[in-house]
Amino acid sequence: MASLRSSPGVLRLASISIIARLPMAMLSIALLVHVRHLTGSFATAGVVAGAFAVSLGVGGPLLGRLVDRRGQTVVLLAGALVAGAALAGTAALPARAPLALLVALAVVLGLGMPPVGACLRAILPAIIRDREALRAAYAAESAAIELTWIVGPPFVLFVGVAWSTSAALVVAGAVLVAGTAVFAAQPASRAWRPAPAPERPRGGSLRAPAMRTLVLLLVFVGVVFGTVEVAVIAAVADLGSPGAAGPLLGLWGAGSLAGGVVAARMGGGARTGAGLALMLAALAAGHLALAAAAGSAVALAAVLALAGATIAPTYATIYAMVDHAAPAGTVTEAFAWLETAVAVGASIGAASAGAVADAAGPAAAFAVAGAAGTVAALVAALRARPLNAPPYPMAAPAAA
């Protein structure tokens, strides 16, 4: 993570942002378990979790747009308070609470989730002026965020078992509010201002063809992720070892962490649209190989670690392209759209994988993941030119 130490305060800022984003990795499973506990129904829990996912996808770009207009401090603090209140309200509900109330609180939670990740990535160009160091910083941040997915779900499940599912939501809410408040109080966050633009482009960040391409690519990447998660669960169930799903998915995240560290040390991933296409081809091949490993937990573990190593470098490459792909004054919204794209794709992938796994087995579901990654690689190859950085230095967003 040496690249995150390239400027004073960068490592501290990134570390605080990771803590503030830890609840994001907790909440889907925490809501699912809590609502199941309240209502006794997995179907109801799925509806509530789905409402949270949809509202999160809608709220991210909207809050990102507000950040691009008003700065980070007020938007982050207001979002944290709204989301924290929604979590507290959900934790306080009695058993057999009405579905409409549970869904409403889940929607408020999703709409209010502060876009800390998008804000951090928007700040980095303002405090890391060297473009190579910036690319490496994106790679290091993409690797480090995997820690939240390795630590978050097991931690929230432990709290739920040791105390209660309500306590798990309260703990997640406390971390969310406190972490976001500390991040928003950092000088770099308070001082950040979007790049001056003569007029906000109609359509925001998605007006740019390169941004639309990046969003489309991450939808397909999200399909890969959602498909693999379900396919792993189906595979270990067929093997008679359902408890192995968590450790296997943890290895997948650990592989991404390792890949991101290597990418950061090597300069931060690919630099052109053609390079991104090759990166996506590697991601597709790694996840397609899971189809051949579906019959063995040991083989799945090895291939998941290798396939995961392509994830963080792919993210890092795409994040570095936002600097020149997004129109001036829309960078936070642009990063938020990328997060939404992954969430949408993951939902599509999870739903598709469930149907495919039931009909044809987990190997076929892994094949779907490989196919989605292949489509992403082809789109990147066909749209490589708009993704290339212009041959002149771009101005970094201003910091007041």
Image: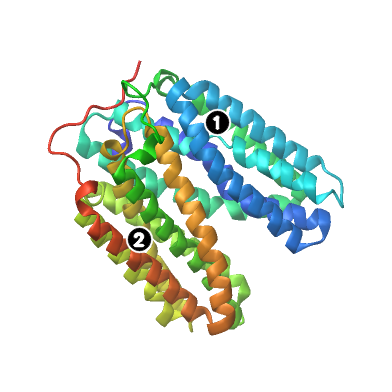
Residue assigned mark 2: 309
Could you tell me the amino acid type at mark 2? Ala
The answer to whether residue 297 of the structure is visible from this angle is no
Instruction: For mark 1, give the secondary structure.
Output: helix
Residue assigned mark 1: 180
Badge 2: how crowded within 10 Å, few (<14), some, or many (20+)? many
- Tell me: residue 74, above or below residue 164: above
Query: What residue is shown at x 64% (from left), y 48% (from top)?
Result: 52
Q: CA distance from mark 1 to mark 2?
A: 29 Å
Q: Which mark, residue 117?
A: none
Query: What residue is shown at x 85% (from left), y 48% (from top)?
Result: 97
Q: Residue 110 appears in which quarter of the rendering?
A: top right
- Tell me: residue 190, above or below residue 298: above
Residue in the foreground of this view, choosing between 355 and 38 = 355
Query: What residue is shown at x 53% (from left), y 84% (from top)?
Result: 360
Image x and y of residue 260, in percent: 34, 52
Q: Is residue 308 left or right of residue 383?
A: right
